[in-house]
Image (cartoon, rainbow, N blue to C red):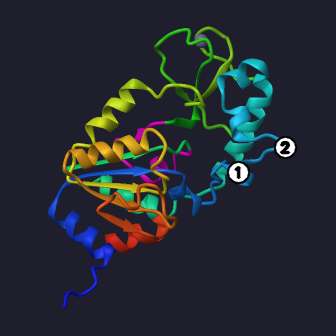
Amino acid sequence: MSPAVDPIEQVAARLRRTQRVTILTGAGVSAASGVPTFRGKDGLWRQYQATDLATPEAFARDPKLVWEWYRWRRELIAGCQPNAAHDVIAQWSQRGGAWQVITQNVDDLDLRAGTRDLIRLHGSIWELSCWQRCRRVPRPWRDERVPLPDGLPTCPVCGGLARPAVVWFGEDLDRLDVARATAATDCDVFIAAGTSSVVYPAASLLGQAKACGAFTVEINPAVTAASADVDCAIAQGAEVAFPAIHARL
Ligand code: ZN
């Protein structure tokens, strides 16, 4: 007679034994904070989909329209607070040892919760960069004003257009961020939370962690393409699962 294995306890037991833990978070982690996923009907603004606006082509064609959309998104996100998942992840990142957090979210709720050494694969909606890439330095700069002043934001170096410092569809991820995220897959426990784990880079990071011998965990209320491949799938929202694991540490 073997008792049914409680996945929460299974993960907690692993975390009690190691300090080499990497956590990858996606839109599902911020959903409980009220941040829209900007996919499907949820992401509709006026008559546009995110895929119509979050591209360099859209910005080149009509920067004012794209900036209006980002102003709207900033206002929405400014009213959101980190949830229990962000808080637990932030606490873990502040421990000694090698706890690394990678996020695909641009809302910076992880930063507001106090996460250390956060790798933001898709950039931040609270930062701007030069549309013309006039210089490598300065890198993206922070501008948290809501609303942003009227008119289009400009680059302080060349005076040209500034853009949101986020990775758009069709753009490459920052090589340094990818290198850091890849290095972090060499861990003992890899947790993918609130991400479908099917699109790059989530899928490849999970696969690399597995190849490095990590115990892999998925936290997602929905079944995903990765659910059958991970060592432990927790079918709960991140805001429920993370505090439950934390309580057992
Ligand atoms: Zn510039």
Q: Which residues are magenta?
A: 107-121
Give, as a three-letter code, the residue at label 2. Answer: Arg
User: Circle 2 is placed at which residue position?
Assistant: 46
Q: Position of residue 236 (x, y in %)?
A: 47, 70
In the image, what residue occupies the spot 48% across and 67% down?
239
241 over 195 or under it: above or below: below
Mark 1 nearby-residue class (10 Å; few <14, some 14–19, many ≥20)? few
Q: Is residue 249 something that shows in the picture?
A: no
Q: Are marks 1 and 2 in contact (CB under 8 Å)?
A: no
Q: Is residue 125 magenta?
A: no
Q: Is residue 70 visible?
A: yes
- Left or right of 127 on screen, residue 182: left
For disc 1, does the CB lie below 8 Å from ligand 1?
A: no
Point out which mark residue 40 bears: 1
Q: Residue furthest left?
A: 17
Residue depicted at 27% across the width and 79% down the height: 5
Q: CA distance from mark 1 to mark 2?
A: 13 Å
Q: Nearer the viewer, mark 1 or mark 2?
A: 1
The quarter holding residue 205 reads top left
Was residue 110 drawn as part of the magenta stretch in this picture? yes
Q: Within 10 angstroms of label 2, few (less than 14), some, or many (20 or more) residues?
A: few
Residue 87 picture location, percent across and down: 43, 61
Q: Position of residue 134 (x, y in %)?
A: 56, 8
Q: Position of residue 6 (x, y in %)?
A: 31, 79
Question: Which quarter of the rendered picture does the N terminus lie within?
Answer: bottom left
Amino acid type, label 1: Gly
Left or right of 153? Residue 205 is: left
Question: Quadrant of residue 189 in the image?
Answer: bottom left
Identify the residue at image location x=56%, y=13%.
133
Which residue shows up at 49% across the image and 53% down it? Answer: 196
Q: Identify the secondary structure beneath mark 2.
A: loop
